[in-house]
Image (spheres, grey):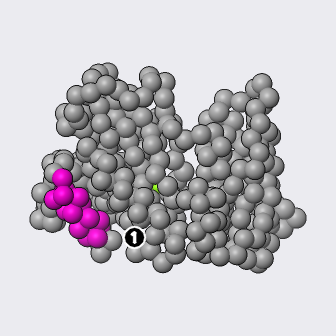
Amino acid sequence: MKTGTVTIIGRPNVGKSTLLNALLGEKIAIVSDKPQTTRSRILGVVHRPGAQIVLLDTPGIHSPRHELNKRMVRTAIEASEEADVLYVMVEATGPPQAGDRAVLRHVREVTDASPRPAFLLINKVDLVNKARVLPLIADYSRLLDWTEIVPLSAKAGDNLDRLLDLTVKFLPEGEAPFGEDTLTDQSMRVLAAELIREKLFLRTQQEIPYSLAVEIDDFKEEGKLARIAATIFVEKDSQKGIVVGKSGALLKAVGTEARQDMERLFGMKVFLQLWVKVRAGWREDDRALEELGY
Ligand SMILES: Nc1nc2c(ncn2[C@@H]2O[C@H](COP(=O)(O)OP(=O)(O)O)[C@@H](O)[C@H]2O)c(=O)[nH]1
Ligand SMILES: [Mg+2]
């Protein structure tokens, strides 16, 4: 058996979580059009004939301003240090940005400390003309000595099989760490909280998505029904009004969308109750961050 850990890193919003979901064929990592959607390390297991790949999706590497973000970046760095193979993701839509260069500096540090294969993944090729990818490959090749360079589209599913074939070659021999049916190490509670947060991210703007956290208060399974109660934390009273929405409309829409995703993922009926509470300054508060699982 070939098996090992593959960590996906990159600046925020390049498509790391979309790739994790695409490689798993199941949505276990939340995705939005906004940067910093992913806040924790997300483990997914890819099963291939003769191989098991333990994939780690990570928060985007960025300059952190809040304690929450410092923890997010630390999580990404630590997960990259565990990797047998590093996936370093960038976008095909433009030349390397300052954020990409910061990621590459980190890759250099990790590979200098302990040499390991680093793949450059040029994502979102569906958005550009093929002719634009070649100069990008040249740009990035000047910046680092890549083991492999793989242009792909996580969203359209382009070149993913080739990526996995190349990856398996670089994995060590070993015993598979997870059972054949294992998809993730995340509990249903965590998945439920994340799906609620995703729907909120998609429906709120500006500072609000970043001021939100979700905590599951109660999760009861009764046969084929799950009864879930969750609290959405915001930082200010004014945000609470916005998250609840006019006559509760936004909260209701979020609840419906999250419930539908949970029913699909868990294969059971879900009864979901949502509450909104103000918890000022939770993003800077060590105790609150621990309680919220960050
Ligand atoms: N067109 C296109 N969009 C993508 C692709 N991969 C991700 N996206 C979009 O990019 C945004 C950020 O994706 P996400 O996976 O959350 O990025 P992350 O922050 O790196 O995890 C979302 O709107 C995705 O739908 C891709 O291959 N093509
Ligand atoms: Mg993500």
Residue at image coords 27%, 27%: 174
Local packing at callout 1 (Cα closer than 10 Å; few below 14, some 14-19, many 20+) is many
* Residue closer to the observer: 241 or 106: 106
Quarter of the rendering occupied by the N terminus: top left
Instruction: State the predominant SS element of the stretch in magenta.
Output: helix
Q: Check the image and report above or below for 147 versus 202.
A: above
Identified by mark 1, the residue type is His
Residue at image coords 69%, 36%: 263
List the residue tagged with mark 1: 62
Residue at image coords 26%, 64%: 106
Looking at the rendering, the stretch of residues picked out in magenta corresponds to: 100-114
Q: Position of residue 14 (x, y in %)?
A: 39, 59
Residue 38 visible somewhere in the drawing: yes
Q: Secondary structure at mark 1?
A: loop
Q: Is residue 84 left or right of residue 147?
A: right
Q: Position of residue 50 (x, y in %)?
A: 29, 22
Q: Quadrant of residue 84?
A: top left
Q: Position of residue 136 (x, y in %)?
A: 20, 62
Whether residue 235 appears in magenta in the rendering, the answer is no
Residue 125 visible somewhere in the drawing: no
Residue extending furthest toward the front = 287
State how many labels appear.
1
